Amino acid sequence: MHFSKWNFLMTFFGICTLVSDFGVDLWIAVKYFQQGLHVFSLLTIVFIIISNAIVNIFSYAWFKDDCAEGNTRKLRWVCLIHVLMAGTFLRYWYAVKCGYRAAMLPQSEGEFMKTNKKAVDAMTDLSMLRCFKTFLESIPQLILQIYILMEHGQITLLQYATIIISVSSISWSTVDYHMSLRSSLEDKKEIRFGFAAFTYVLYKLLTLTSWILSLVFLLACNVNIFAAFLGILWVVGLCWAWKQNTEFCTNMCMEIFYRIVVAIILVFTFFNVKGQKTRIPMSVYYTFRVLATTSILILCFLFKESLTQNLFFTIFSIALVLALGLGIISLILYYCLFHPALHSKYQNNDAVDGQVERIRSHYFINQ
């Protein structure tokens, strides 16, 4: 992949997005507190702290893996920055620095190859970290916001806008990660812009939206069932990640931590955690998704009549059914017509262990 000026501008834009996201999160927490929703305000802050802590742990571990031996002084400063929860900013600074050299400055062919690789790797790492943050913070917060809207009705127009932006941001973060990762792997063909990218965005946007609404309905129906259901899904996801015998990290402790995080992500969307063939696992995953969504709707009608009389429930349930149906159709269209492997005669559908230098990028490829 050639790191272009567009990639550089998007990386710079990512810094602005990071700052604005942090500001919006704090603003939402303050709004909840002002509305008397102190528990929800606390939960929002907890989501922010936990997700940022996990992201910084992975970021530091990757810096440590990439750091040359003997460069302990630099690593200490990097460690301090990550302890202060500013590791993502450091990565953006590094990505902007490498990206500027690769995209803007004239270089010899040999220097360009090295600089371009550093820029692409930095961009890919950031995409992966954003993906982690999306599923550890953004989605739980979105579920919380929609739940408050349904149960309490205490929400402003700006919060409505925040919900819509959050749904789009979550979907795009997942798609951006997928596109960046495929671009960084030499044995993977990039997703074509146009119908291919549009169909993939629709697939992620619609399936995630329908599942988030389903979980909100379950939460509104019964908190205990909601917690137990998520717990069961997480355990199943953890067992699946363990069964794949992933080798994403260089030490076993981080590998276990990685599998725990992957299990959380699998609660919300399908991820191919080890570059395997995905037709059967994905079919099982989304078949279960349809059955679970149907069961949740039936549960709401049978045991939470007051919820079904809520106007928001009617609107959201219609949106849920439409989103799920169109999302599955988009998924089928993407894999039948637009998947990059269909347009490459020699490309395997899945990554093979050890083919690329950056093992973490190689392993954590979704679909």
Image: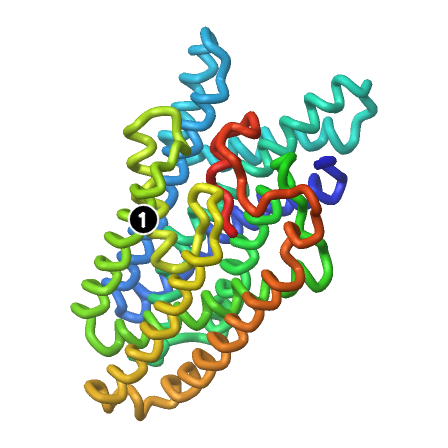
Q: Looking at the image, is 53 positioned above or below residue 133? A: above
Residue at the extreme top: 70
Q: Please report the residue visible at 29 percent of the width from the left and 78 percent of the height from the top.
A: 295
Residue 166 image point, x, y percent? 49, 63
Q: Can residue 103 be seen in this view?
A: yes
Q: What quarter of the picture does the N terminus occupy?
A: top right
Q: In this view, does 231 lie to the left or right of 348?
A: left
Please tell me how many numbered marks the rendered image carries. 1
Q: In this view, does 238 lie to the left or right of 1?
A: left
Pick the residue in front: 314 or 48: 314
Residue 29 image point, x, y percent? 35, 59
Pick the residue in front: 268 or 158: 268
Q: Looking at the image, is 214 positioned above or below residue 304? A: above
Residue 170 image point, x, y percent? 50, 58
Q: Can residue 154 be seen in this view?
A: no
Given the image, on which type of amino acid does mark 1 rest? Trp
Q: In this view, does 276 lie to the left or right of 355?
A: left
Q: Label 1: state its secondary structure.
A: helix
The quarter holding residue 247 reads: top left
The quarter holding residue 310 reads: bottom left
Residue 63 image point, x, y percent? 47, 25
Q: Please report the residue visible at 44 percent of the width from the left and 19 percent of the height from the top.
A: 77
Pick the residue in front: 308 or 292: 292
Residue placed under numbered mark 1 in the picture: 240
The quarter holding residue 9 reads: top right
